[in-house]
Image (cartoon, rainbow, N blue to C red):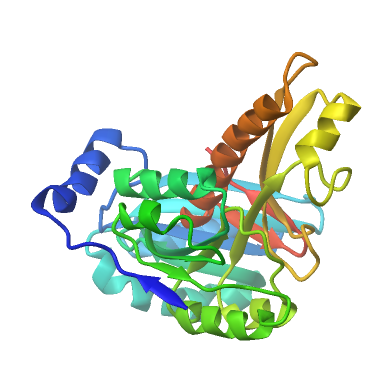
């Protein structure tokens, strides 16, 4: 295992992320400490919105955004995401969460819920192999403040991207993975990841994670792959797609489960291609889609816009 530590920060590198955040204004609520999000999944019934709105009003919280959906107005599942503003939220959020649980969770038949503040960025780790397009895009967006996330570690089974990652001031860890040492390699990865991160992103990590690894990781894992699956699984998908005359190139971002590439889908997109495009052009256009799809999936997860329900998702996208 090889660890490449980031270089010391200079005055310029310390100030760049803040300037970029102020300039881009891309994240939902910036770093305002009095903005919170309440996300709820429960059985649908009358009075849910009224009860939750009253709860927030009783805590002097002003609702500034609300989105809701039901799977069936008669006996279905209800999904709600509210963004609110409350003075001194940081100091009171734990007490609010306790009161929400004691007063509304059982009453509304809540399946799962979360109450968070935008003041705290998600801690994100990235796993990658040799393709750099998704990794560098995430690092660049995080540095500019376009992701409400702090990328604290990159793990790779190859050493190739160490210098690229190091230039962003992010630790890079090389853990080789072979058929013979897979269990040992995953144990080393878990030592670094477990209890240290809120999300792990597979930015073209070309290894299959074991069920044991996913059980122990303790946080969600998001993956990105081309949308040819299952038609062109395995090596050289773009070459085989070219010989079949594909007209669409796309990407899928999903949560990782033990069933390979069958986890709940967060985001997908496609672009049209034609017979004039060679394999290199197909790959380039595919990489462009993968970057944008993975960015949106990670952004929406970090903004509490994604609710998982069994093997599907409800996404409150902008």
* Outermost residue to the left: 11
Q: Position of residue 263 (x, y in %)?
A: 75, 60
Residue 267 visible to the viewer = yes
Q: Position of residue 138 (x, y in %)?
A: 45, 48
Quarter of the image where one finds residue 243: top right
Q: Position of residue 188 (x, y in %)?
A: 53, 83
Does 46 sit left or right of 127 as displayed? right
Does 199 sit left or right of 272 as displayed? left
Q: Position of residue 292 (x, y in %)?
A: 55, 37
Q: Residue at x 17, y 63 (%)?
A: 8
Is 138 rendered above or below residue 280?
below
Is 161 rendered above or below residue 89?
above
Q: Nearer the viewer, residue 268 or 27?
A: 268
Is 316 rendered above or below residue 285?
below
* Outermost residue to the top: 276
Residue 65 visible to the viewer = no
Q: Residue at x 67, y 79 (%)?
A: 182
Q: Nearer the viewer, residue 26 or 225?
A: 225
Does 229 sit left or right of 167 as displayed? right
Q: Nearer the viewer, residue 89 or 256?
A: 256
Q: Residue at x 71, y 35 (%)?
A: 250
Q: Residue at x 53, y 60 (%)?
A: 39
| Total numbered circles | 0
């Amino acid at each position: 295992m090889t660890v490449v530590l980031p270089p010391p920060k200079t005055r310029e590198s310390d100030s760049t992320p803040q300037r970029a955040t102020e300039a881009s204004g891309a994240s939902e609520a910036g770093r305002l400490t009095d903005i919170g999000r309440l996300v709820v999944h429960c059985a649908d019934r009358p009075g849910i919105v009224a009860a939750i709105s009253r709860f927030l009003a009783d805590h002097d919280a002003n609702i500034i955004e609300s989105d809701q959906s039901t799977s069936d107005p008669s006996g279905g599942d209800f999904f709600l995401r509210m963004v609110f503003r409350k003075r001194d939220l940081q100091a009171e959020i734990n007490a609010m969460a306790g009161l929400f649980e004691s007063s509304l969770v059982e009453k509304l038949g809540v399946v799962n819920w979360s109450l968070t503040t935008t003041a705290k960025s998600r801690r994100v780790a990235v796993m990658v192999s040799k393709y750099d397009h998704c990794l560098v895009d995430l690092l660049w967006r995080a540095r500019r403040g376009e992701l409400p996330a702090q990328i604290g570690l990159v793990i790779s089974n190859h050493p190739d991207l160490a210098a690229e990652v190091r230039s962003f001031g992010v630790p890079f860890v090389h853990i080789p993975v072979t058929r013979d040492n897979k269990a040992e390699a995953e144990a080393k990865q878990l030592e670094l990841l477990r209890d240290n991160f809120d999300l792990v992103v597979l930015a073209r990590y070309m290894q299959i994670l074991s069920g044991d690894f996913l059980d122990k990781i303790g946080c969600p894992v998001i993956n990105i792959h081309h949308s040819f699956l299952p038609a062109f699984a395995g090596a050289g998908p773009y070459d085989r797609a070219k010989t079949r005359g594909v007209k669409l190139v796309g990407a899928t971002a999903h949560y990782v489960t033990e069933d390979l590439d069958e986890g709940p889908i967060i985001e997908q997109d496609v672009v049209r291609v034609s017979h004039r495009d060679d394999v290199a052009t197909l790959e380039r256009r595919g990489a462009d889609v993968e970057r944008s799809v993975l960015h949106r999936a990670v952004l929406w997860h970090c903004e509490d816009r994604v609710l998982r329900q069994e093997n599907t998702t409800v996404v409150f996208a902008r």
